[in-house]
Image (cartoon, rainbow, N blue to C red):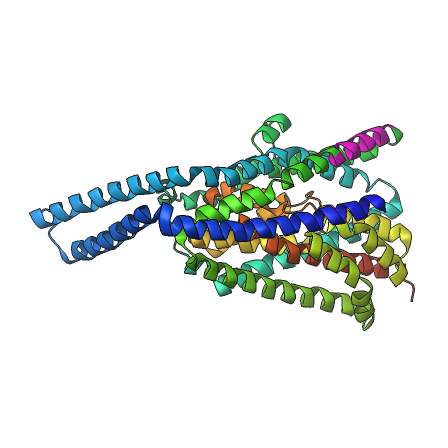
């Protein structure tokens, strides 16, 4: 209990520091925008206006061999060079700020392989091979994957409806102009090669999340099948996962500084106008979370009728704890206690709830499609329905095994962006507002795991009135 209380205090402090870093970054960014890089911003805006005017003129000239067309084309190339040079000069001046965010993202990517591997091996191994455990595990996973798919699909539908990324006009690097988006249309052969690793070590070295997941599944099932000898492995990986979580905690201590750097750099480039887009994004995302809550609770009410209101009353405190600390993991002990008080038997709660922290993060799931497609929209990358569905399925697979670690969704999103040739620089857009979004999705993760535990308890006739 002491550790939980200490963790909650640290979580509250970290959230406060991140919010301070967010607003301090906005203030510094505004000052940088209006003074330090003001000349560069004006020059970039002027070249963009001139370039648009030239493009308009070029469209009116039918003879591409004429001297007028040649002159205008030469002017357009010169403006492009000027803009590129100015962008490079501005980025150089803002490099100390952007580096803070870049280093943080690299540290997050550093822990992805050991985090996914250790948590997923332990989670799968705990399923065991006993008949009862197998039956409960089957029902649990069926619910988890169904809820995950609904959450991902809802996020995809809402981001396509709201289109929050369309309102942002970001200065794109030259490499982003060639998106290579067609490469996302994977053939069956390419997809299977991407799923199954030729080398587990190579997959971990390259942060191939999906391949790591596949190897972890084999490793976990094999560990569970060898009985007592497997217990040594499970204990070892459980200890390793705790070490990795501790490292994650160290990394997250840098989040306020990273948020400050990211916001300062973004606002310096874009001005305060970007906050309008962020407020729209935050409002739309939280509206989506509210809709997801309604869907989950309606699904739960199909099994327990009006008792769903009693369930909400029971888990109110864990929800508030997860929201304030931005960590659904911080609310785990209290959630377990309240679900047992609600009437769920201990044998079901102790199995389903821990498994849910690796396989059933509904709020994070919705965020993954919402955020990934938002970044694509921001960069003007069009993804057709088939590509979006393939992204949804990739997220469905790659996200499994990530425990309730604060802001771990960034890791999965980073891998997905690379898979679909979407600029990873887009993560900087999310970094500034991610703490505010993480509060909502952490609370939603608690609701999703509580609903899953209650439903499986009802299926197993292990729910007392």
Assign the C terminus to one quadrant of the image.
Answer: bottom right
Q: Is residue 351 magenta?
A: no
Front residue of 324/194: it is 324
Front residue of 67/250: it is 250
- Residue at 86 percent across and 52 percent down: it is 348
**Can residue 157 be seen at all in this image of the molecule?**
no
- The percent position of residue 443, horizontal first and vertical second, equals 70, 57
Q: How many marks?
A: 0
Front residue of 29/65: it is 29
Q: Is residue 378 left or right of residue 57?
A: right
- The percent position of residue 322, horizontal first and vertical second, equals 72, 55
**Can residue 181 be seen at all in this image of the molecule?**
yes
Q: Is residue 414 above or below residue 276?
A: above
- The percent position of residue 354, horizontal first and vertical second, equals 79, 47
Outermost residue, left direction? 67
Q: Which residues are magenta?
A: 229-242
Q: Is residue 55 left or right of residue 216?
A: left
- The percent position of residue 318, horizontal first and vertical second, equals 78, 57
Q: Is residue 239 magenta?
A: yes
Q: Main secondary structure of the magenta part?
A: helix
- Residue at 84 percent across and 53 percent down: it is 336
Q: Is residue 52 above or below residue 286?
A: above
């Amino acid at each position: 209990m002491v550790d939980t209380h200490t963790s909650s205090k640290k979580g509250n402090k970290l959230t406060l520091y991140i919010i301070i870093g967010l607003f301090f970054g906005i203030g510094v960014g505004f000052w940088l925008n209006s003074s330090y890089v003001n000349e560069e911003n004006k020059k970039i805006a002027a070249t963009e206006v001139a370039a648009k005017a030239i493009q308009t003129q070029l469209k009116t000239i039918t003879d591409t061999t004429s001297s007028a067309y040649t002159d205008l084309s030469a002017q357009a190339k010169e403006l492009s060079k000027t803009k590129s040079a100015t962008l490079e000069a501005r980025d150089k001046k803002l490099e100390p700020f952007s580096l803070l965010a870049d280093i943080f993202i690299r540290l997050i990517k550093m822990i992805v392989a050991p985090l996914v591997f250790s948590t997923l091996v332990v989670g799968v191994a705990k399923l065991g091979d006993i008949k009862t455990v197998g039956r409960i595990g089957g029902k649990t996973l069926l619910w988890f994957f169904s809820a995950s798919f609904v959450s991902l699909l809802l996020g995809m539908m809402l981001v396509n409806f709201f289109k929050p990324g369309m309102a942002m006009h970001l200065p794109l690097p030259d490499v982003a102009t060639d998106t290579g988006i067609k490469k996302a249309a994977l053939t069956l052969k390419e997809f299977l090669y991407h799923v199954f690793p030729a080398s587990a070590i190579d997959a971990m070295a390259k942060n191939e999340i999906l391949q790591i997941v596949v190897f972890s599944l084999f490793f976990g099932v094999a560990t569970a099948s060898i009985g007592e000898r497997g217990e040594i492995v499970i204990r070892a990986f459980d200890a390793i996962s705790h070490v990795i979580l501790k490292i994650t905690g160290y990394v997250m201590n840098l989040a306020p500084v990273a948020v400050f750097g990211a916001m300062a750099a973004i606002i310096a480039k874009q001005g305060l106008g970007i906050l309008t887009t962020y407020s729209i994004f935050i409002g739309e995302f939280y509206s989506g979370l509210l809709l997801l809550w309604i869907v989950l609770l309606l699904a739960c009410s199909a099994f327990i009728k009006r008792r769903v209101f009693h369930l909400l009353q029971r888990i109110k405190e864990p929800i508030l704890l997860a929201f304030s600390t931005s960590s659904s993991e911080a609310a785990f002990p209290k959630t377990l206690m309240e679900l047992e008080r609600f009437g769920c038997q201990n044998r079901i709660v102790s199995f389903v709830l821990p498994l849910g922290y690796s396989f059933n993060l509904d709020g994070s799931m919705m965020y993954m499609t919402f955020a990934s497609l938002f970044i694509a929209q921001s960069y003007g990358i069009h993804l057709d329905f088939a590509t979006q569905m393939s992204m949804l399925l990739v997220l469905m697979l790659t996200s499994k095994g990530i425990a309730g670690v604060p802001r771990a969704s960034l890791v999965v999103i980073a891998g997905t962006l690379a898979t679909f040739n979407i600029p990873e620089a887009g993560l900087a857009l999310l970094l500034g507002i991610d703490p505010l979004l993480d509060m909502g999705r952490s609370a939603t993760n608690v609701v999703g795991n509580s609903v899953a535990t209650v439903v499986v308890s009802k299926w197993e006739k292990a729910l007392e009135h």
